[in-house]
Image (tube, grey):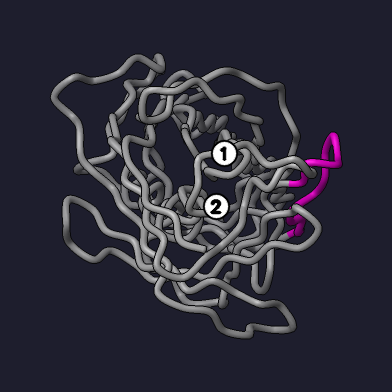
Amino acid sequence: MEHTMTRRGDTLRLWRWGVLVAVGALTLVAGGCSTDEESSGPPNYFPFTTGSWWAYVGTELDTAGNEVPDRRWRDSLVIVGQTEVEGKRAAVIVTYTDGSPADTIMAATEGGRLYYYFGGQSLQRLPFPTPRGWVMFADPNAAEWTAWDTTVTGFPVRLPGLPQEVAISGRFEWKGQRGGTTTVTVKGRSVTAQEFVTTISFSGDLFFGVLRAGTASFRFPIRLWAADGIGIVRRQEDPPVAVITSNLLPGGQQRFSFSGQRRVLVDYSLQQ
């Protein structure tokens, strides 16, 4: 049985929004110097300078990855300061959606790598475990990496299609990968952007009490493209897919497809 869902009005939409609050808004962060000239050294994809800001146009993607024309909004990010968090120099970033403050997040760079900070806060809309501490989301010098990896046993969740809360046991992974390059247009000029992908996934078993009731899997790729001296010029959350297999379900299996998102940089102001 196939189910499709948008990001508004359902339980797993709230699950997705929890991910976006903890992860997706972070990957919009960009930085750079106050000139549009190309740098002569190694690519500086993620410099963070206080006072810089970036504006994006967001578009919802249907479950096939096509843009939904009437689902658009505007996101912006402002670096409001710098601080120290668990051994890293962190940029303090305030995010806005359609002009209203949405979140405050921390990001840092080391050796060209991009990190986001997870404080272990309770995310009520995110029923799965989340990392704690600094998590790497981009590395220009590595082909792939493990951003986070954990095994859970008996973690309680409520999943659509099942009559009651269940427990899951299995493996969560956040795997990173450096993709290829592409040419994008930013404020009327062509720039080369490097792709980075973080794929959030789960694979494991379902339990009602001590009784194994089936299996569950989930896959959610988040892609960002960064340009030297500009930052994140595009970000895309591919439509996630979850599959539940259980004899308790009609037909034995349910497949859930969710809406995705795409954000494109339209304006920015960078400070020294």
Residue at x-position 47% and y-position 24%: 255
Tell us which disc is closer to us: 1 or 2.
1
Q: Residues within 10 Å of mark 2 (few under 14, many from 20)?
A: many
Q: Which residue lies furthest to the right in this view?
A: 142
Q: In this view, does 5 lie above or below 206?
A: above
In three-dimensional space, the C-alpha distance between marks 1 and 2, rounded to whole angstroms, equals 11 Å
Q: Name the residue under label 2.
A: 32
Q: Residue 47 carries which label?
A: none
Where's residue 209, x and y in %? 58, 61
Q: Is residue 242 something that shows in the picture?
A: yes
Towards the viewer: 131 or 114 = 114
Q: Tag 1's secondary structure? A: loop
The residue type indicated by label 1 comes to: Glu
Quadrant into which the N terminus falls: top left
Indicate the quadrant where residue 79 lies: bottom left
Where's residue 222, x and y in %? 55, 37
Bounds of the magenta span? Answer: 139-151
Side of 165 where 87 appears, left or right: right
Q: In this view, does 181 lie above or below 194?
A: above
Q: In this view, does 64 lie above or below 224?
A: above
Q: Which mark is residue 37?
A: 1
Residue at x-position 66% and y-position 60%: 115
Residue at x-position 74% and y-position 83%: 87
Residue at x-position 44% and y-position 57%: 165
Towards the viewer: 120 or 208 = 120
The residue type indicated by label 2 comes to: Gly
Q: Is residue 239 above or below residue 138?
A: above
Q: Is residue 20 magenta?
A: no
- Most common secondary structure along the magenta stretch: strand
Towards the viewer: 1 or 63 = 63
